[in-house]
Amino acid sequence: MHACTDLLSKANTYAEQHFSDVVLSEEYLNLGVEQVCSLISSDKLTIASEEKVFEAVIAWVNHDKDVRQELMARLMEHVRLPLLSREYLVQRVEEEILVKNSSACKDYLIEAMKYHLLPTEQRALMKSTRTKLRTPASLPKLMMVVGGQAPKAIRSVECYDFKEERWHQVAELPSRRCRAGMVYMGGMVYAVGGFNGSLRVRTVDSYDPVKDQWTSVANMQDRRSTLGAAVLNGLLYAVGGFDGSTGLSSVEVYNLKTNEWFHVAPMNTRRSSVGVGVVGGKLYAVGGYDGASRQCLSSVECYDANSNEWSYVAEMSTRRSGAGEWINVSYPFNDENSWV
């Protein structure tokens, strides 16, 4: 019995990690509705986009449409429509006849559209299983090194495969870039701003690991190199940096769903070569270089997205700029709000 349970667990894990391939198979199309619901409700699905889940549901229903179309509402309960772009919701989901024929499915669509219309702070309060990001257990599989200087800015991108213990060249950046911000968000890697060898840039490129392809997205409003970049509440933050003449205190945010950048409250201090990280639902800007005083900084600021305010927290004991951005392994403060 234990062996059967173990085998089933491994089969489920395989299906989660290879979802895009599994849903193309005849075996998937012949699953029962409970098995499909169990699969698509998993937080651990490895997918580039929630579109894959929606299309998998439509394919399964259409495989035996007369019998299965009445099951659409049960299935759509587990599709995270709010995580899809507005364009896809309007052009694909709303036009799908299986959705139009179900009042419950139309309610899920309205929920998703309402989610897109809400301001960021209210959106965070709209919590349901359908607004929760999926968190694949198998990620990250690769480590990416993007651009850099050698000694001038370069376009080269490489990935390190931990299983094979070797580096692979992947698609090059569309243009030369060093001193950029880098984040992973929504299944894509983003290269934000930087220096092209002549100018500090506003451009932003996203990398699709499935297609091995870079695509340019909306430009930032400010030119920035040596910026900090991080993801908070599903939004990409570009923090501080250097525009070619001065250090920046400004902060702007990229909304993937609308492909737009907008400014939020600036930091209290100009910071280029700033380290950033997200801990406990807040964004931290650590150290950096203040071009006005020409000093490296020991001060640290914390951004609360709900109040749109930056506030100082305890200073580090050492001045530093160009600090490595951290992985959240533990909170950096002790009970006295001091660095340890």
Image (cartoon, grey):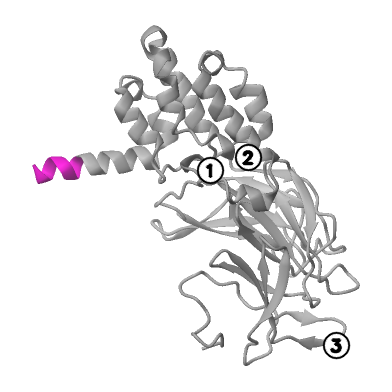
Q: Name the residue at 75% across, 59% down.
A: 177
Quadrant in which the N terminus appears: top left
Between circles 2 and 3, the one closer to the viewer is 2
Earlier sequence position, callout 1 versus callout 2: 2
Whole-number angstrom distance, CA of label 2 to CA of label 3: 44 Å
Q: Residues within 10 Å of mark 1 (few under 14, many from 20)?
A: some
Where residue 291 appears, as percent x and y from the top left, is: 85, 81
The kind of residue on which mark 1 rests is Thr
Magenta stretch in the rendered image: 1-7
Q: Name the residue at 78% across, 46% down.
A: 218
The kind of residue on which mark 2 rests is Tyr
The answer to whether residue 171 of the structure is visible from this angle is: no
Q: Which residue is mark 1?
A: 131
Q: Which residue is mark 2?
A: 115
Q: State the image quarter where residue 311 is shown.
A: bottom right
Q: Pointers 1 and 2 in contact (CB under 8 A)?
A: yes
Where residue 273 appears, as percent x and y from the top left, is: 73, 75
Q: Which residue is mark 3?
A: 293
Q: Secondary structure at mark 1?
A: helix
